[in-house]
Image (cartoon, helix red, strand yellow):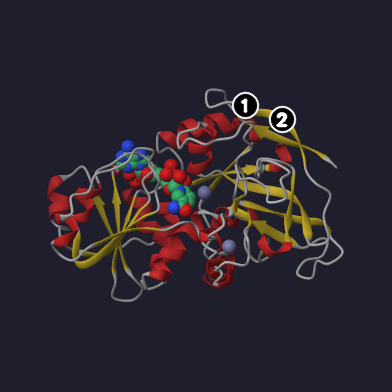
Amino acid sequence: MPSVKSYAAQSAETPLAPYTIVRRDPKPHDVQIQILYCGVCHSDLHTARGEWGGTVYPCVPGHEIVGKVTAVGSHVKKFKVGDLAGVGCLVDSCRECDNCKDGLEQYCSNGMVGTYNGQEKDGSGNTYGGYSKSIVTHEDFVLRISDKLPLEAVAPLLCAGITTYSPLRHWKVGKGTRVAVLGLGGLGHMGVKLAAAMGAEVTMLSHSPSKEKDAKRLGAHNFVLTSDAAQTKAVTGYFDFILDTVSADHDYNFYLGLLRTNGTMVCVGAPPSPATIPAFNIIFGRKSFAGSLIGGIPETQEMLDFCAEHNIVSDVEVIAIRDINEAYERMLKGDVRYRFVIDMATL
Ligand code: NAP
Ligand code: ZN
Ligand code: ZN
């Protein structure tokens, strides 16, 4: 089985550093992919630093993977050597439960297998993600990638794209919907682009005044600085739908107040601490407070095709892998415009 270069965290306290992993040889349904680019998601940081608990070390993060197929198993039908291919946040699921049959593998009743920090179903151990030279994945969890768009800017679609696309579709956002996207980072900037492409009226809610110009360039119709009381008062009771992408602890109740009657606030951001929401804050106005996890494989392919059709990609800053720890620090400060993507040629 081939040894593969990667970057791993050895504990919650240690920075990421070079590490050699072993990938399996392709089984009959496997696709082996040389990774060209891997996006840097805030979930990588939460996991590498053990912020959610449950991290198995060494941890090789990365679930926004694009690359080229270098080998396929004997039964693979969807891919051939030389094809572009993508791997997102999950690499396996039971395929038998109702959710899997509905293409909602991320909600597999028997537990989906994450691209990193997951447990392989064959008992072979922990999964390692895209901060590595190559990956071997069952063809059912490999996505087709258009050759029309810049590859480095497509990589973030595999998590930031689908995580925002899926709730926008599920709650039927479109023309006439007043949408707010809370937090302008990797997920947030994709949320703005996608909601605008779906025809919604989009407002950016941000705590960073410096991002107003960018928000409008990305497709937001309005910008509200969340630290400015006069600006937030003007949108109290205004939105049909709020997509909350904030990575740090914040007051959900404040934002529930910006929903109109029957409005829905969906959490995709996953801050480490639990929150308290008084029932009255959703009883009055018949409001919904919901969550959404990435997206299933069919919907991820649908999103990639939608992006190719509408010419939507991520705004990226390409980095060398040796700069990953600095990139994490900058991400924590909100200093990323709007997704770091690692050029794997630097590994
Ligand atoms: P990111 O690029 O770091 O963006 C997070 C944004 O949140 C920041 O740009 C900032 O926007 C805002 N923010 C950060 N700290 C804040 C604070 N103290 N107060 C208020 N706002 C703050 O992160 P990301 O990669 O988009 O990920 C966002 C979150 O989604 C993470 O928790 C990640 O784990 C989670 N996630 C969930 C799923 C899912 O399936 N549900 C999938 C992927 C990621 P402004 O400067 O505009 O305020
Ligand atoms: Zn992610
Ligand atoms: Zn299942």
Q: In the image, what residue occupies the spot 59% across and 65% down?
A: 297
- 2 to the left or right of 302: right
Q: Which x, y percent locates residue 319? A: 60, 39
Q: Quadrant of residue 195?
A: bottom left
Would you call the spot at circle 2 few (<14 residues within 10 Å), some (14-19), or many (20 or more)? some
- Closest to the observer, 339 or 249: 249
Circle 2: residue type: Tyr
Q: In the rendered image, which residue does mark 1 sit on? A: 10
- Disc number at residue 269? none
- Closest to the observer, 122 or 172: 122
Mark found first going from the N terminus, 1 or 2 = 1
Considering only vertical position in the picture, is 211 above or below 53? below
Q: Which x, y percent locates residue 63? A: 60, 49
Q: Which x, y percent locates residue 201? A: 30, 68
Mark 2: which secondary structure? strand
Quadrant of the rendering where the N terminus is positioned: top right
Q: In the image, what residue occupies the spot 39% across and 57% down?
A: 217
- 225 to the left or right of 48: left
Looking at mark 2, is its residue's CB closer than 8 Å to ligand 2? Answer: no
- Disc number at residue 19? 2
Q: Quadrant of residue 3?
A: top right
Q: In the image, what residue occupies the spot 41% across and 64% down?
A: 167
What is the tally of numbered marks visible in this picture?
A: 2
Q: Ligand 3, what quadrant?
A: bottom right
How far apart are the alpha carbons under marks 1 and 2?
9 Å
Quadrant of the rendering where the C terminus is positioned: top right
